[in-house]
Image: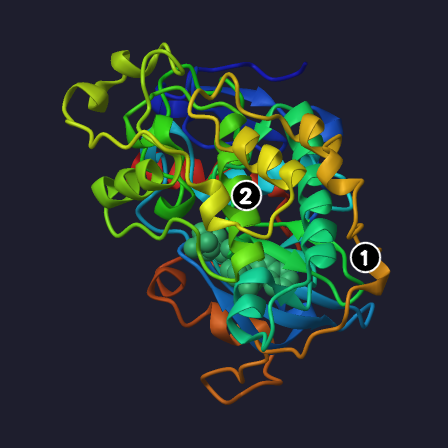
Amino acid sequence: MGSDYTDYRDPSRQVQRKGELLNFRTMKFCEIPSKDVFGRCRYVSSFQKCNRVGEGTYGIVFRARDTVSDEIVALKKVRIDQDIFKDGFPISGIREIHILKKCKHENVVQLKEVVVGNSLESIFLVMEFCEQDLASLLDNMDSPFTESQVKCILIQLLKGLKYLHSNYIIHRDLKVSNLLLTDKGCLKIADFGLARYLGEPDKPMTPGLVTLWYRPPELLFGAKIQTTAVDMWATGCIMGELLTHKPLLPGTSEISQIELIINLLGTPSESIWPDFPKLPMAQHFTLKVQPYNNLKIKFPLLSAAGLRLLNFLFMYNPSNRAAAEECLLSTYFKEAPLPCDPKLMPTFPHHRDIKSSSGKNAEPAKRSSTTTSAANNSKPFEAGHLPTISDLLGSLIKKRRVD
Ligand SMILES: Nc1ncnc2c1ncn2[C@@H]1O[C@H](COP(=O)(O)OP(=O)(O)OP(=O)(O)O)[C@@H](O)[C@H]1O
């Protein structure tokens, strides 16, 4: 390695050199291994914005056309604001790039490239385009999914999760709006802004991250360590939502979320969950006593195998909760009605084709990227030196440190 590993805190050395990255744990520069260099980023002006398809906490997503290849893609503008370095790790956008770059599975949304606008903060993820997300689909469907469609969706979700978990990636924000569906019936897990590698970082993870309705009891009771079981609880909530066509546990606060869980599954106890009394919040709450598991009442039409699967996903003790691989072996997927083939999933009307609010649908995406105040304050990239992803990450980290 040719890097001199100079300490970042040396004031004469605070500029990242080409091909280097600041390791923010050691605060030293290190050379980027060639396998991790993604190539030069294109400008976002190579894309023509068609319409906005979604907006989440961390970014706006557009349907766009690659003017070079003519391909339709999803362009997610990464929102770069105050949350950099929050809980000791760079912003969600950087996490998302880092993790998605490593993922290659048909049930995980594919990151094609990262493109840049006129400023350092203007960064876009170019992803394969998916015509639907399950949240807007559920909101707009006249009749619920059939059970065989639900099974088809669940199997794909579980395959995607099996891949992620076997690669030590925890998604941490599974919910219907983060599950995309192509017109070919292929489900893709998206939005890796909160994803983490299992066991990383060393310090405890923030417990309040997973969206409330999908948040598992261990996080509600303040567990600091998160495992892949977090995603499996969310999978149980998604299974319930797909079957009943409405959110299963729509709590309005952490307390009401805990109450809804207890109403459905009974009160947790040390006998079924030995670590429970040790959790920080377990000592603060006096829990309502509810001795019954009401899953069978909530899902009267679900087969015994379906109920077994749901119960396995809803184990209070995260160590006993079903793993994705185990769920895929469930009898539920082998009994009638059998899961439909993804190719036979119906094509649903496209509900998200909202016209861009500016009314300038065919404007190049670059236009919108230059209107943010952050963009206006920033130095444009020099012509002839398009950054690499590593340059971008390094610049962002440096900027925030200096700020
Ligand atoms: N690849 C894609 N193809 C089509 N639509 C997409 C794609 N990625 C995201 N979307 C749409 O944009 C919405 C928001 O995207 P995403 O969840 O990645 O953003 P976010 O800011 O991280 O959201 P959240 O608030 O859930 O954290 C999704 O619900 C979906 O409707």
Left or right of 134 in this view: 158:
right
Other-residue count near label 1 (Cα within 10 Å), few / some / many at <14 / 14–19 / ≥20: some
Measured as percent of width and height from the top left, residue 235 is found at 55, 41
Disc 2 residue type?
Answer: Phe
Residue at image position (63%, 31%) is 19
Q: Is residue 206 visible?
A: no
Provide residue 263's location: percent of width, then percent of height.
Answer: 32, 41
Across and down, in percent, residue 217 comes to 36, 30
Q: Quadrant of ligand 1?
A: bottom right
Q: Position of residue 207 (x, y in %)?
A: 33, 30
Residue at image point 53% right, 51% down = 300
Q: The residue tagged with tag 1: helix, strand or loop?
A: helix
Query: Nearest the camera: 264 or 87?
Result: 264
Position of residue 306 relative to residue 181, above or below, is above
Q: Which mark is residue 342?
A: 1
| The C terminus sits in image quarter | top left
Count all numbered tags in the image, as a single digit. 2
The residue under label 2 is 192
Q: Nearer the viewer, residue 110 or 188?
A: 188
